[in-house]
Amino acid sequence: MSEDKKILNSLAVTIGVLVVIAIIISVVATNLVEDKVDTAKEEMKILERIKPLGELATTLEEAQKASPIVEEPVVAVAKEPATPEQIYNTACMACHASGVAGAPVMGDVASWAPRIGQGKDVLIEHAIKGFKGMPARGGSSQLSDEDVIAAVEFMIEKSQ
């Protein structure tokens, strides 16, 4: 009978451990379900925190609707288009005057020859989209494709 008591005691301990594990699992599961409910609330709080501070008014009416203080429209003065040399001086010169990050120096015929040999279209594509260490549009995102093309043609002309 002592052997039967040992088996019953072992069985009781095993059942007790399984009950404790079941309780732990149910507590964890309950917390996870509550977290999902809280997640929706948290998402709303995050969206509220990161919402834009304002909106861009593209017309005078929109600006006046947003802020009655706006009385006179702001007039943008159009400036003359930049010359290829001006584009080079503002966007390209920082790297192509000194050879930063492997950029060919403008006027160095030896370093430009293999690039020019690839064709002007390839050079223009690399200048617009970026290539290796060179960022797209030479890092000047405000440049139009025409500006970039003019600058590339200027550098090719000066490097042949």
Image (cartoon, grey):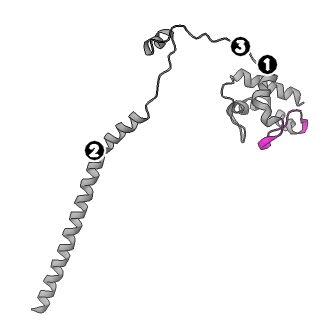
10 Å neighbourhood of mark 2: few (<14), some, or many (≥20)? few
Front residue of this view, candidates 141 and 150: 141
Residue annotated with mark 1: 83
Residue 26 x, y percent position in the rendering: 22, 59
Residue annotated with mark 3: 79
Magenta region's main secondary structure? loop
Start-end of magenta stretch: 97-110
Mark 1: amino acid: Thr
Mark 2: amino acid: Val
10 Å neighbourhood of mark 3: few (<14), some, or many (≥20)? few
Mark 3: amino acid: Lys
Q: CA distance from mark 3 to mark 2?
A: 56 Å
Front residue of this view, candidates 28 and 104: 28
Residue 136 x, y percent position in the rendering: 68, 33
Q: Is residue 120 above or below residue 16?
A: above
| Residue 37 included in the magenta stretch of the image | no
Residue visible at 21% across and 64% down in the picture: 23
The dot on residue 37 is 2
